[in-house]
């Protein structure tokens, strides 16, 4: 294999080429570009860096960052978790109250209400009649 000379590699990067866009029907030249490998490399690298920069800016400065796992700040996510937990606790407590209420309604409609009778005897004083 031939050894590459740094001077020849640099020379190949600077060689100029012509890119011609032609009309296929009339063979008329529409656009002509004079390019080198180095200019193509610089152009593609610039486009890549710009796209990466725009993507990062889009994620950082918009609410899209909340869709990335672990990207939200720990403090705000902890606060949000506490708020959600409090909300879930209150909803579950409210559902327990509603279940108890509905079960009582069902018992009334079925007639299964346990009736506690007062079986204590009352001791009433005897009526005293006076002849006054």
Image (cartoon, grey):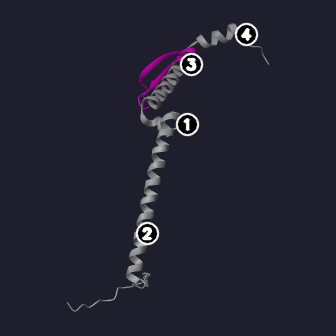
Which label's residue is closer to the chain start, 3 or 2?
A: 3
Which label's residue is closer to the chain start, 3 or 4?
A: 4
* Any part of residue 72 in sight: no
Tell me the distance, in whole angstroms, between the alpha carbons under discs 3 and 1: 35 Å
Magenta-drawn segment: 18-42
Q: Position of residue 116 (x, y in %)?
A: 43, 81
* Residue most extreme to the front: 132
Q: Which numbered disc covers residue 70? A: 1
Which label's residue is closer to the chain start, 1 or 4?
A: 4
User: Residue 131, located in which quarter of the rendered image?
Assistant: bottom left
Element on which disc 4 rests: loop
Residue at mark 2? 100
Q: Position of residue 79 (x, y in %)?
A: 47, 39
Element on which disc 3 rests: helix
Tell me the distance, in whole angstroms, between the alpha carbons under discs 1 and 2: 41 Å
Tell me the mark number nearer the camera, choosing from 1 and 4: 1
- Depth order, front residue of 131/68: 131
* Any part of residue 32 in sight: yes
Tell me the distance, in whole angstroms, between the alpha carbons under discs 3 and 2: 74 Å
Which label's residue is closer to the chain start, 1 or 2?
A: 1
Name the residue rendered at 59%, 12% in the picture: 15
Dot 3 alpha-carbon crowd within 10 angstroms: few under 14, some 14 to 19, many 20 or more: few
Q: Which numbered disc covers residue 41? A: 3
In magenta segment, residue 32: yes
Q: Which numbered disc covers residue 5? A: 4
Q: Position of residue 44 (x, y in %)?
A: 53, 22
- Depth order, front residue of 60/126: 126
Q: Are marks 3 and 2 in contact (CB under 8 Å)?
A: no
* Residue most extreme to the left: 132
Q: Position of residue 109 (x, y in %)?
A: 38, 81
């Amino acid at each position: 294999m031939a050894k590459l000379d740094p001077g020849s590699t640099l020379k190949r990067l600077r060689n100029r080429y012509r890119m011609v866009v032609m009309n296929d029907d009339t063979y008329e030249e529409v656009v002509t570009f004079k390019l080198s490998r180095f200019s193509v490399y610089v152009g593609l690298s610039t486009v890549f860096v710009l796209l990466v920069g725009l993507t990062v800016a889009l994620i950082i400065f918009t609410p899209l960052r909340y869709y990335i796992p672990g990207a939200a700040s720990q403090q705000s996510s902890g606060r949000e978790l506490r708020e959600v937990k409090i909300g879930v606790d209150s909803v579950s407590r409210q559902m327990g109250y509603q279940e108890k209420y509905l079960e009582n309604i069902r018992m009334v409609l079925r007639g299964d209400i346990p009736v506690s009778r007062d079986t204590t005897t009352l001791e009433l004083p005897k009526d005293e009649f006076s002849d006054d």
